[in-house]
Amino acid sequence: MKRATYILLLVAITSSCYGQVVERHIYPYDDRREFVYELFTDNDDFDWSTGNVLLIPAGDPNEVPVYDANGNPTWYDNFWFNPNTETLYVPILDTNSIDANDIDVNNLTIGTLTASRIVATDGSKKLVSISDFTLWVGGTSNRITVSNDGDGTITITTPQDTHTAASPTFAGMTIVNAITEFSTDGTLADNSDSAVPTEKAVKTYVDASATPPGGSNTQVQYNDNGSFGGDAEMVYDDSSNVLNVYQLTADEVKLEGQLDVLLLHTGDKLLLEAGGNLMLETFSLEDAIVHMDADGFLTLDSDLKWDPTGNTLSINGTVKSGDGGTTNYTEIETDGTIEFLGDATVWNDINVGAAMLSLPAAGNPDEDEYVDEGGSDTGVSTWAYAIGEKSSGSLEIPHDYKEGSDIYFHIHYQGITAPGGGTDNIKWQLEYTVGQDGETLDATTTITKEEAYTTQYSFTNHDFAAITGTNFNIGDQFLFTIERIAASADDYAGDCLVSTVGLHYECDTAGSRQITTK
């Protein structure tokens, strides 16, 4: 250790010599301030703040001072700085006497290192930042792979995924503490959960456990409370490939299937031929169809016959086809009448040509010809209705009508004039009443129908709203007047050439059973 000494350099500040040292004196540290004062007391050119005087610590070259709390330096021979290599050298301390409080570094910055990297020493024992961490951390072949990320970090991977949702593949696997052996014990006596029996062991066990047939020779086998059983009533003859089932009671033999029971009277034989044909040997009614009677016995019915020559099914009785005769079905009655019930009903319509309609004394339509798509007359004429023109007619409700059901009046017509605004409206008014045999007429009812007309020369069909038919019957007379009236807006300016008017109605038979009644 050395006593602190400073070198005082007197620098001359002149116009021709800046920074030139003109005097050099070395004084003890304690006399520094007093010396400076005495030296420059009579020198008016001295200005301390200009740096004309430099105070330089007087240790050996490159030695580094360590200051105490009062700012007094102490110089150490083995603690020095090399400015050429920018290296700070510190003494090697006695590790046995190091105390944690001897070294206190609050903030140390080393410019040659890379931020956020792990630090190690290189071959010259200098601190360096690690760029390839795989030099320190390595993997194991087929187990762990360590990859350098190039930024001081690494990625560790396995050959394949092994998480709970993964499906790893292995060429082979050894299961420890689960399957402990492949057992050759043919008795399976250990009853172990950790032993797998060999094929030979299984065969030995099954062969030893086989149950011999029950009953006598040729008897068909069945499960008899866990054992094989035989029955003298069921015998198979392998010489003729015949299965014989004998009567179980005094008067019947039962052949039970999955869903039904087939009962045969005593003496009847049900034979299954080699070609797969099932034959009732003792039944003598030719072409009769076999069915089960109310008691479950297999029987023949003379009302059901099949003619294989003409592929004709003959049924003497009522036939119901559909949902089995519950709600929606077609029924053929014993006299051959066809009736449609529920959703089996169909629709039909009855029409009358407009040329057949009667005209009133005033407000009747003019006669005009239908026009083809090119606008030329076709030579076929009908009544052409302008607003306020009308005609009358009548229709008889047909005999295939489903009595009591609603009916729908409809009209077919052609417009021969182009709609004025691209879309015009046409409105029709129907005034009707219904005449029934032996009854007086009710007052007329009026309904209307309005629709848009968009395409010149096109034919259009309009259905009016349903007309309640609760009291309507076949043969009723539907009396009506059809009139074209003003629309709610944008009236079509041209005439409407009516072709037909009529009724859409629901059918439940092909006609009526009698001339005047359903």
Image (cartoon, rainbow, N blue to C red):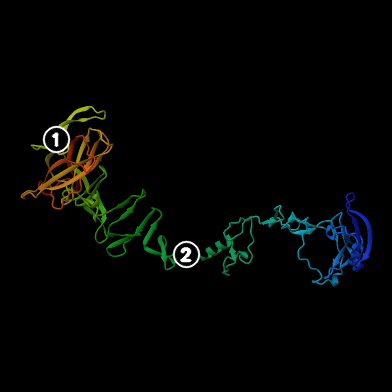
Q: Answer few, some or many: residues within 10 Å of disc 1's Cα (few below 14, many 20 plus, some between 14 and 19).
A: many
Determine whether, in the image, residue 72 is placed left or right of residue 149.
right
Circle 1 SS class: loop
Q: How far across and how far down the image is residue 37, in percent?
A: 89, 65
Q: How far across and how far down the image is residue 192, in percent?
A: 58, 68
Q: Which residue is mark 2?
A: 212
Q: How far across and how far down the image is residue 187, in percent?
A: 56, 67
| Residue at figure coordinates x 61%, y 66% from the top left | 178
Q: Which residue is mark 1?
A: 365
Query: Could you say which is closer to the camera, residue 162 or residue 424?
Result: 424
Camera-side mark, 2 or 1: 1
Tag 2: residue type? Pro
| Residue at figure coordinates x 80%, y 72% from the top left | 101
The N terminus is located in which quarter?
bottom right
Query: Could you say which is closer to the camera, residue 242 or residue 185?
Result: 185
Tag 1: residue type? Pro
Determine whether, in the image, residue 30 is placed left or right of residue 251.
right
Circle 2 SS class: loop
Quadrant for residue 114, please give it: bottom right
Query: Could you say which is closer to the camera, residue 340 or residue 351?
Result: 351
Q: Note whether residue 398 is visible.
A: no
Q: Note whether residue 165 is visible.
A: yes
